[in-house]
Each structure stands twice: as structure tokens, then as C-alpha cells.
Amino acid sequence: MPARWPTVNTRKAPDPAQTPTSDYSDHDSFQVEAQGHAFTFYPRGSDRLEALVDHIDKARETLDVFYYMFQDDKSGHRVRDALVSAAERGVRVHLIIDDFGSDAPIEFFEPLQQAGGRFAVFSADWNVRYLVRNHQKFAVADNARVMTGGSNVSDHYFSTPDDNGWCDLGVAIEGEVVQQFTRWFQLLSEWTESEGSQFRKVRRMIRQWDPGDGPVQLLLGGPLVRRSHWSYRFKKDLAKAARLDLVTAYFGPPRSIRRLIGKVAARGEARLVLAGKSDLDGTIDVARLYYRKLIRKGAEIFEFQPCKLHMKLLVADHNSYFGSANLDRRSVRINIELMVRVQDKQLAERLREFIGHLEQASIRADAKWYRQQTTWFARLRWRFFHWLSLADYRVARSIAD
């Protein structure tokens, strides 16, 4: 099927002979057709913003939008104004934001409501609010096209690496899986309109979610849900995989996933591109605590250097995952997350090439490097933030600051 999303090809990939941070630029956008779907990937922040606004501008009937973070800044104004314009031309616009993640005040969204759009906040009651966060990001247009990935609506996610922007990934999708996004948004809408926190209801929504058995699936995750969780499907893929390539902003998965990664490394290949810079320095400490065993198993670990890393991309054999979930305990056990799973060899190979672009801008955390980093004070710090991360990364940041 033809892809109808814009691509931008204005910059060259960095020379592998260069140092990790010199002359780095985000990868060009690229398209892959797989399993009856068209996927367009946007690694560059400016491309993601332009694609999102274009996505909104081209909507003719409906726009169902959910974002964990929506900020009152330049990018936030531009996206909000695009939603307002859509409502003014007769599109049925429905925006939901997460109460914990978003900084924009309620009055910031009044122009959308005045234009006829619907606006709601995903917020649990005070007793569970601190635990339950809807970390998803997606925008569905006309039940035919969706944009998803790791990016929120904030200048930080669309700025360049030189301007301390996040290295992230947006994905535009056309195909049958978009109908699953629409169905999920309807459930979220019903939840936000119900009284109280409805903690059990949101767990039940995720537990009963049926992604089907096709090669392209929308997988979910949520608090205290196991078998229907995106990570449950990922672990099944890991158990059989001979090769794993992943990029994740926060690395601190449960022991069961770490063991499976080690087994993949021992019997095949495992490449992990992790954050060398972050808004939460404690997350890097947590990740480094787990390096030693993985390196001994044969895993290749790299720390991305040019800027903060926010990407979520997992490729196990021919199975690719991308969406909102990090590979850490909060994403696996607490947050409400989404990951798109695609079973396709061509797509997996193309995404591995893209991960190679990030590897070129990274330093390798091999055994020698690890020994140099592992002072007694460093290990004490790593363990300290490990225990804090079991409660919350933001607690760790407040203490570190």
C-alpha cells in the first residue's frame, strides 16, 4: 500500500570514523511497508513536529488524541492551535492529557473547548494518583492514520541535539491496527468520564484487551497486569530469540527480563543502546548496576552521547516493538503504556540499521570501561538509586538535585 506520510532527507548519516559526538545529526525519516501497513519513522524532532501538525491539519472527520505530557510552550501552542483549527472546520476533536505528566494549565485548553472540541484529564484519585500514570502518546485521525511513539508535546521533544533536545522516535502508521487505537481511545474516554479513580476498571480494561493474533498488534500495559501485558509478549519473543537490538531511555527491567536478555546474548547477539545523558541522572546509575552480568554473558552495551535519550525501540529476531514504554520497572509494572508489535523481517532489519546509526554516536561500555567506572562509591550510588527507583524516579531526581 502506498505511504502518504512526508519524509525529509536533508542530512547525511555521521561517518563511523568520527568520534561519537562530533558532527552528529538525527537520522532522516524513513518509510517501510510491512504486513499491509505503512510505517513512517521520524527520528528528528523538527520532522516529528511538522508531521504531527500535518497529521492534524489533514483530518476531516475525527481526531482522538492522548498525550502524557502537553506543555504550555511554543510547540504546545502550535499543536493546540492546530487542534483548534480542526475543530473550527468541523472535525470532532477529543483531547485527553495525563494529569501527572502535563504542565499546561486547564485554561490553556479553553480555546479548544470554545471551538467545539472535547477536553478531558486522565487523573486517578489522590490515594492512587501518584502510582497510576497514563504514559501513552498517540493521535488518531479519521480512524485511518495514527501517530505514536515516545514524544510528548513539548519543545524538549522537538529541539535539536545541540539545543538539548531529546533523541526520540515518532511513528506514523496506516493500516488495520489504527482501528485498535480508536477502540482503545474510546475505552480511555469512558474511563475519564466515570466517577472516582476506577483503579480496578482500568486494570480490567488492560487485562481484557484483545490485540488479535495478526502480525501487527497494539499491545498495552498497566498496573499489576501480567499475562495480557506488552512485556509478557516481549518475554515470549525473547525466550526464542537469537538476536536482540534495543534502544531505551531508562533501563532497569525486572530480573526475569534481564535473565532473558542474558540468555539471548549467550546463545546469539544482544546489542543495547542506553542513555549516556538523561534528565534523571539516577536512571543511568540504575542501568549501570546491571551491566556487569550482561557483559559477561556477551551483551554489547553502548551509551548514547550527543544528547538525552528518550527512545523506546525493541527488536527481537523479526519482532519489532515501538511505542511509549521504557524497559524499566515502572513501564513494566505500573504505568499505563502502549507498544506496537510488528512481526516482519524487512522492518526488523531496517530498524537494526537505524539502531546502528545511534551506536555510531555512542561509547561502548565493555568490560574494561566497566572496571574503570566501578569504584566503591559508584557502586554505592548505583545501589542507592536502584532502591529509590523501585519507588519512583522523580523521588530519585529530587534527592539528586
Image: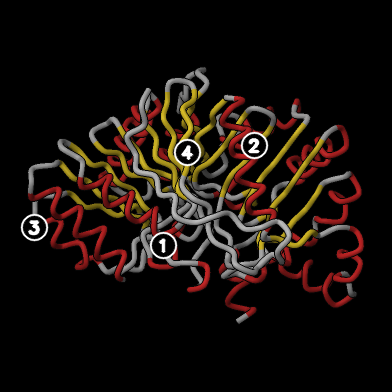
Q: Which residue is mark 2?
A: 315
Position of residue 277 relative to residue 335, above or below, is below
Q: Amino acid at mark 3?
A: Gln
Q: Position of residue 300 (x, y in %)?
A: 80, 49
Count of numbered badges drawn on the protein:
4
Mark closer to the observer (4, 3): 3
Residue that sits furthest to the top in the current view: 213
Q: Secondary structure at mark 2?
A: strand
Mark closer to the observer (3, 2): 2
Label 2 and label 4: CA atoms lie apart by 27 Å
Mark 1 vs 3: CB contact within 8 A: no
Q: Which residue is mark 3?
A: 114
Mark closer to the observer (2, 4): 2
The label on residue 158 is 1
Give the crowd class for mark 3: few <14, some 14-19, many >=20 residues within 10 Å.
Answer: few
Side of 290 relative to 5 (left or right) = right
Mark closer to the observer (4, 1): 1
Q: Earlier in the sequence, mark 1 or mark 2?
A: 1
Give the crowd class for mark 4: few <14, some 14-19, many >=20 residues within 10 Å.
Answer: some
Label 4 and label 1: CA atoms lie apart by 32 Å
The residue depicted at 51 percent of the width and 55 percent of the height is 168
Q: Amino acid at mark 4?
A: Arg
